[in-house]
Each structure stands twice: as structure tokens, then as C-alpha cells.
Amino acid sequence: MGLPTRARLVKEAVDEALSLFGPSVREVVYYHCEVKFGVKREEVVFRLGELMSCLEEIFSEASKVVERQILDRLSVKLKVDLKGRGLRELAEGLEELLASL
């Protein structure tokens, strides 16, 4: 069974944002998330806090650029204003957010 529509949109937003930095960067991030944090690619949508930790470990301060790209794409796809929010904050309320849309 596939992901629910809203969860699929979150996954697409993450994929698109990571792809801006090239397909190899996207694959390295997913690999690192799985090896270091135990988060498989298909689980990232439900574990955005761990994704943010992974991005911070890989990119340090530049992780904020990646985070902003993810949130910008999520805003468009989910038709929700996410300005001023972060992935960790979104992760904490993800179930509520996905249920309310």
C-alpha cells in the first residue's frame, strides 16, 4: 500500500529539495540517514526530526538552506504557509498537520 496523498507530497518535497543539490547529494543524504540514524528513505516523511539531525551532521550551518528548500516546497504542495517554522517543529506536529489538511 502506498503513502497517503499528503505524506506522499511531503516525500516529494523532500526529494525535490535534496535533488536541487544533485542526485548524488540526495542519495548520500538518504544513505547517511539510513546508516547513521536508522531512517529508511520511505520513513523520512514520518521522521523529519531525524532528517534534520542528519542534514546538520552532513552540512552543518548550510543545513538551514536545505531545510528552507524543503519547507518552501512543502508550502506549495500542501498549500500551507510554513514561513517561520522549522523541520523539527513540523515533525512534532506532522501527524496533526497531515490530518488537518
Image (cartoon, helix red, strand yellow):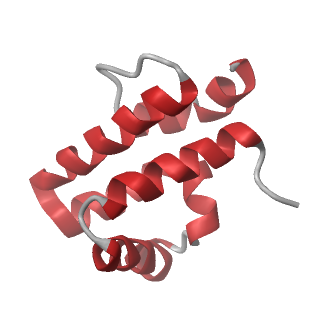
Q: Is residue 6 above or below residue 51?
A: above
- 14 with respect to 69 (left or right): right
Q: Is residue 15 visible?
A: yes
Residue lying farthest right?
Answer: 1
Q: Quadrant of residue 81?
A: top left
Residue lying farthest left?
Answer: 61
| Rendered residue at 53%/34% (across/down) | 92
| Rendered residue at 24%/64% (across/down) | 21
Percent x, y for residue 73?
41, 37
Frontmost residue, 69 versus 59: 69
Percent x, y for residue 63?
21, 53
| Rendered residue at 81%/58% (across/down) | 2
Q: Is residue 42 above or below residue 75?
A: below
Percent x, y for residue 85?
35, 25
Q: Is residue 50 visible?
A: no
Frontmost residue, 91 versus 13: 13
Percent x, y for residue 59?
17, 63
Q: Is residue 23 above or below residue 13?
A: below
The N terminus - image quarter? bottom right
Q: Is residue 69 above or below residue 28?
A: above
- 19 with respect to 60 (left or right): right
- 39 with respect to 50 (left or right): right
The C terminus - image quarter? top right
Q: Quadrant of residue 58?
A: bottom left
Frontmost residue, 38 versus 26: 26
| Rendered residue at 31%/80% (across/down) | 24
Count of numbered tags = 0
